[in-house]
Image (cartoon, helix red, strand yellow):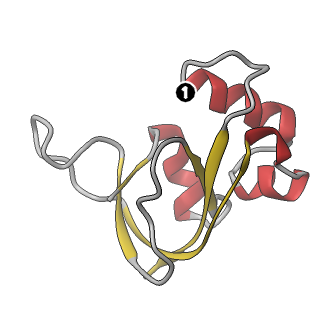
Amino acid sequence: MLLFRPEHVAAILDGRKTQTRRLGKKRWNVGVIHKCYTKPPFARGGAEPFASVKILAVRQEPLRSISHDDAEAEGYTGIGTYLYAFCAINWMATDANPLVWVVTFKREGK
């Protein structure tokens, strides 16, 4: 299972978002297919997945090591807009530089 913000759904569905950066422990393995949700499936009301994605690569790097191409793969127009969004989503200072997991994926199906 991978959780995404509702604003990322369209970019995943149309193939503009093919990466996600995550804090915490490694939870993804190359070759595994994950269902994508905007809220946990066990939440009240029972969420339905909006897509399935296959994990193509997983690596770890400092957040601010992101390249312009990677920011675009995250579904953003540039590094600055991506970093601002990441820090807002994760409630951290915009000058933070934690190690993050970079998960590259492709949408399965349609």
Which of the 4 image quadrants contains residue 38? Answer: top left
Which of the 4 image quadrants contains residue 43? Answer: top left
Q: Secondary structure at mark 1?
A: helix
Vertical relation: 3 (above or below) 36: above
Vertical relation: 13 (above or below) 10: below
Q: From the top left corner, tell me how far across and down residue 101 is, in percent.
A: 60, 53
- Of 58 and 54, the residue lying toward us: 58
Residue projecting furthest to the right: 68
**Residue 66 in the figure: left or right of residue 91:** right
**Residue 25 in the figure: left or right of residue 82:** left
Q: From the top left corner, tell me how far across and down residue 66 is, in percent.
A: 82, 48
Q: Is residue 110 visible?
A: no
Task: Write the residue at 46% across / 74% down.
Answer: 29
From the image, which quarter does the N terminus lie in?
bottom left
Task: Write the residue at 10% across / 34% down.
Answer: 44
Which of the 4 image quadrants contains residue 72? Answer: bottom right
- Of 81 and 28, the residue lying toward us: 28
Q: From the top left corner, tell me how far across and down residue 77 is, in percent.
A: 82, 44
Q: From the top left corner, tell me how far across and down residue 83 is, in percent.
A: 75, 32
Residue under label 1, please give it: 89
Vertical relation: 7 (above or below) 94: below
- Of 48 and 60, the residue lying toward us: 60
Q: Is residue 93 visible?
A: yes
Q: Amino acid at mark 1?
A: Ile
Vertical relation: 20 (above or below) 5: below
Numbered marks: total: 1
